[in-house]
Amino acid sequence: MLNNIGRRTEFYSVLIGIISFFVSWMLRADPYAPYKGITLNVNFPAHPHYDAVMKIIPDFEKETGIRVQVEQMQYLTMRKMQETELLKPRGRFDLIAFVVFSKADYVFNDQIEPLARFFMTPSLADPYYEPSDIINSYVQNIGVAGGHKGYLPGPTDALYGLPFGAETSILAYRKDLFIKHGLRPPENYSELLNLACKIPELEPGIVGLSSRGQPGHHLSHAFLLHLAPLGGRVFDRYWNPTVNSPQAIRAVKTLKKILDCSPTDMNSYGLREAKNQFLFGRSAMYLDSTVIAGEITDPEKSNVMGKVGWIKHPRGVRYASQTGGFGLAIPKNAKHKDAAFLLMQWLTSKETDKKIALAGGNPIRFSTHLNPDVLKKLPYLETFGKALNDADPDWRPIIPPWSKINILLGGYLSLAMEEGADIQKLLNAANQEIRGIMKEAGYFTYKGKH
């Protein structure tokens, strides 16, 4: 009898072992299995890219069994909510989208997770993910911190986010108007400025080049958009401000000429107004974020479908397009961090990047910009892919004091746009105030070490 009991015990032990093996094997085969049934709370901006993302979120839920609850809101409102939630012991969100200049604050305040642990965990990290396919300048600009200058790659850097809704600058132009008047798309800044002023004379009521001009961060953005191609920087390598350099003076004069040549008042325009001016057919050129591309091909938003050509950001003394937009991060106080990483990885994968592009979003992978299926529907992405070779991750400093500097700079630039303004004097004053902000923040603690 004992032998029978012993045999049964041995049989059940073997059976349990076999079942455990297969359960373990199945869990390894399905990385989502441990998380089926949970709900991830996600915070996204109200933005064309994320509108496209919302169309494919159900695919993730169906594939994984993980539910995704998304709160979408205007990005400044989103930022304020995140600032509140990230301070709590247990936050409201498992995954957040953040605008690029939030990176410095979130990393500095230790509020988002470094991603190394997730990519080192074999049950989470997809071996087919191919991170090298993600556009380098987007990763450097949006995801990396702790390296060169504290916000760029370098020997001491770490990855805190992945680009998602990232953007570069591109020039869109009205092919029909250019053909009508025998014009060529501008290859450099001299040609760009000439066309910005010439087109309103050829086509009364039509703006040559749409631009942001609203005092504050929009005007500062427009200035920086031209500063990098014209050879300027906000700081030198030792954090001395250089917004009064000859290159900066030229960038201000460039922006002023664009605004002065416009037959409409663009001094109150932010990104939305500048985009709409082109989308509604009231402008011949648009030089700003690639986010406009999905709207140009949307018949509900565009009056210029089929009339638009694309070239990369024109050359100043060099080619240098902007980088920016949004990324994804996992809050330190998130409840479901591993599952949030799985969603982040899925959203930024090759297959999903293609789906998002076809739905009207901004792809983040080189392969998507070359994919035949994508290019058949969105041929302009081939030009965007080439333009990304010029994308500059350092066109705008991403440091904790930047928000304060950005507002200050925007104020001085607004004065510089006025008729008869002494641009050099104004930028000298701005430079001095920026130096004071940097000194107060501790940027000149070390001296003579270089």
Image (cartoon, helix red, strand yellow):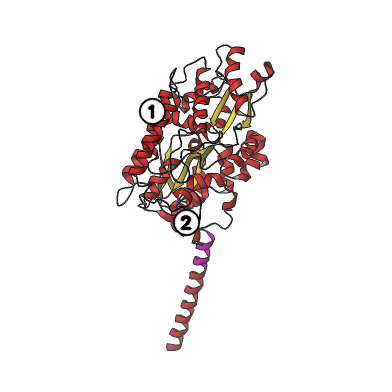
Label 2 sits on residue: 156
Residue 402 in view (yes/no): yes
Dominant SS in magenta: helix
Percent position (x, y) of residue 435?
A: 38, 39
Vertical side of 193 occupied by 385: above or below: below
Specify whether residue 31 is painted magenta. yes
Q: How many labels does the image show?
A: 2
In the foreground, 298 or 443:
443
Residue 54 x/y as whole percent: 48, 39
What is the three-letter code of the residue carrying label 2?
Thr
The magenta segment is: 22-35
Q: Position of 57 compared to 400: left or right?
A: right
| Left-right relation of 90 to 55 | left
Spot occupied by residue 166 in the image (x, y as percentages of width and height): 51, 40
User: In this rendering, is residue 103 above or below 116?
Assistant: above
Is 36 in front, or is 432? 432
Q: Position of residue 196 (x, y in %)?
A: 58, 20
Rendered position, 161 above or below 299: below
* Secondary structure category for the residue under label 1: helix
Q: CA gap, disc 1 to disc 2?
A: 35 Å
Q: Considering only vertical position in the picture, is 13 above or below 306? A: below
Q: What residue sits right under mark 1 in the picture?
A: 411
Residue shown at the point (58%, 45%) measured from the top left: 365
Secondary structure under the numbered disc 2 in the rendered image: loop
Q: Does the magenta stretch include residue 24?
A: yes
